[in-house]
Image (tube, rainbow, N blue to C red):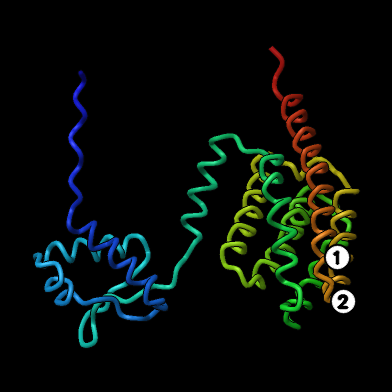
Amino acid sequence: MPQRPPRRRTKLSDIIVEDVKRLIVAQRLNPGDRVPSERDLIATYGCSKGTVREALKALEVEGLVYTRTGPGGGAYLAAADSAPAARMLRNFLHFNHIDGAGVYQIRKVVEPELAAAVVGRLTDAQYVALEANIAACSRVPESEEEQLRRRVLELDFHDILADACPNPLLAFVGRFLNDMLRDLVVLKQAYKPERRQFGEANVDYHRYLMAAYRAGDADRVRALMLEHMRDAERHMTALEGEAANSFLMALPRP
């Protein structure tokens, strides 16, 4: 009978790391709050200073804490930054050949709920930013560079909505999907085929959404956003196909 590999013993420094994370969540600590000091951790776990410093260094590498030296020094909770983790996850998905259809399968679920959650929460400044975005996207692009800029601006509209979302998880997923689409537009050169009706449809849906937001109609916002996502999926799929065909046609003939 084959022997099982020996179970890896959990290092004490790893246990300290997990316990500090639980403490951060349980006590609802905020950026700038101090985490237990080296002295307190040594007393709690009966370990060496080296073990505690290894644990604090691991938390620092993860971006959860930062350290100060001198009077009042120690480890403090850092402001969380999701960007590095999101970039790594996007890279992972790209190497697994995710496409527009895969992104929109999730986006059709997320965007309508995110959009509805924002009703009644948009600030005057966000309304101004959304209207300015629509105006910028209404200009007809005259070059491939402008076509790329327009595709990016169309996604910026949805980032503004994510910024107003009260659910941080929903907001993160919304921004993440927007970034996935930006990557796909650039990597697959899905901005090169001129598809004027796509841009016009996006502007129209964004205008309809603004009217529904000003009316405070969450049901209308949710329905419009779902319809918008379905329409955008059709255009994105077509653009990916056109871009792929253009690439193949450009390859040298054997």
Dot 2 alpha-carbon crowd within 10 angstroms: few under 14, some 14 to 19, many 20 or more? few
Q: Amino acid at mark 1?
A: Arg
Q: Label 1: which residue?
A: 220
Q: Residue furthest front?
A: 1
Q: Nearer the viewer, residue 43 or 98?
A: 43
| Left or right of residue 68: residue 252 | right
The residue located at (36%, 72%) in the rendering is 24
Q: Nearer the viewer, residue 109 or 186?
A: 109
Circle nearer the N terminus (2, 1): 2
The reply to whether the C-beta atoms of the residues labelled 2 and 1 are less than 8 Å apart is: yes
Badge number at residue 2: none
Give the image location of residue 217, x and y in percent: 84, 72
Q: Nearer the viewer, residue 191 or 128?
A: 128
Question: Label 2 vs label 1: CA separation?
Answer: 9 Å
Q: Which of the 4 quarters of the picture holds residue 49?
A: bottom left
Dot 1 alpha-carbon crowd within 10 angstroms: few under 14, some 14 to 19, many 20 or more? some
Q: Which of the 4 quarters of the picture holds residue 178?
A: bottom right
Give the image location of residue 169, x and y in percent: 57, 63
Q: Secondary structure at mark 1?
A: helix
Q: Label 2: which residue?
A: 215
Q: Quadrant of the N terminus?
A: top left
Q: Amino acid at mark 2?
A: Ala
